[in-house]
Image (cartoon, rainbow, N blue to C red):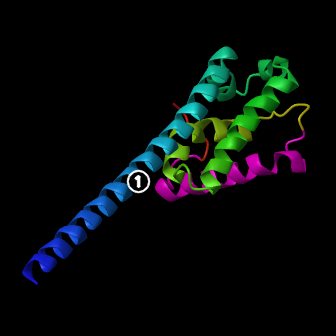
């Protein structure tokens, strides 16, 4: 009977160890997938921002923003909408979205020249507008004394 107990204990320990290792791997892969998701968004948005010098143009709400094609501006908003969907799906945390993409979101939302010809209030941009509202709220939550439009 003692041998049977030892075998049962060894089996139970082995099963628990396997469960622990499996759970640990599942969590690790989830983190890796979230990082890959974030990294893909970050690369695409940075590439577009650099290509059109968006930071400088948005900070000044430069009339040159109108010269960027409607298609390119729409694509950039679409990238931010993808970030919003990832946020809503809890692939990326609100804090991470705010820290890495909130600046673009708030600057674009505040820009009149960026939206020229796009119709900011059209249902087409509802996901972007939801993201902007959420970023304004997060900004207010973490720092109620600063302007909702960030400056660098």
- The magenta stretch spans residue 123: yes
Is 23 situated above or below 33?
A: below
Residue 19 in view of the camera: yes
The main secondary structure of the magenta stretch is: helix
Is 31 on the left-hand or right-hand side of 40?
A: left
Is 89 on the left-hand or right-hand side of 64?
A: left
Is 10 on the left-hand or right-hand side of 19?
A: left
Q: Quadrant of residue 12?
A: bottom left
The residue that appears at 11% across and 84% down in the rendered structure is 1
What kind of element bears circle 1? helix
Is 85 situated above or below 55?
A: below
The residue that appears at 62% across and 24% down in the rendered structure is 55
x then y, percent, for residue 143: 48, 53
- The segment highlighted magenta reads 119-147
Q: Residue furthest left?
A: 2
The residue that appears at 74% across and 46% down in the rendered structure is 128
x then y, percent, for residue 100: 53, 38
Given residues 8 and 45, the one toward you in this image is: 8
Is 2 on the left-hand or right-hand side of 118?
A: left
Q: Quadrant of residue 149?
A: top right
Is 99 situated above or below 6?
A: above
Given residues 62 and 135, the one toward you in this image is: 135
x then y, percent, for residue 125: 82, 45
The residue that appears at 85% across and 20% down in the rendered structure is 69
Q: Residue furthest bottom?
A: 1
x then y, percent, for residue 151: 55, 34
Q: Quadrant of residue 24?
A: bottom left
Is 12 situated above or below 120?
A: below
Given residues 41 and 100, the one toward you in this image is: 41
- Identify residue for label 1: 27
**For mark 1, does the 10 Å Cα neighbourhood hold few (<14), some (14 to 19), or many (20 or more) residues?**
few
């Amino acid at each position: 009977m003692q041998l049977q107990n030892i075998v049962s204990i060894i089996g139970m320990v082995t099963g628990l160890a396997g469960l622990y290792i499996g759970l640990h791997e599942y969590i690790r892969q989830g983190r890796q997938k979230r990082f890959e998701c974030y990294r893909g968004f970050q690369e695409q948005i940075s590439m577009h921002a650099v290509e059109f010098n968006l930071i400088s143009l948005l900070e000044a709400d430069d009339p040159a923003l109108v010269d960027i094609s409607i298609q390119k501006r729409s694509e950039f908003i679409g990238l931010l909408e993808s970030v919003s969907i990832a946020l809503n799906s809890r692939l990326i945390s609100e804090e991470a979205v705010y820290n890495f993409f909130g600046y673009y979101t708030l600057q674009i939302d505040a820009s009149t020249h960026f939206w020229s010809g796009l119709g900011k209030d059209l249902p087409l941009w509802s996901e972007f507008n939801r993201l902007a509202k959420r970023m304004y709220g997060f900004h207010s939550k973490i720092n109620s004394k600063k302007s909702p439009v960030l400056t660098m």
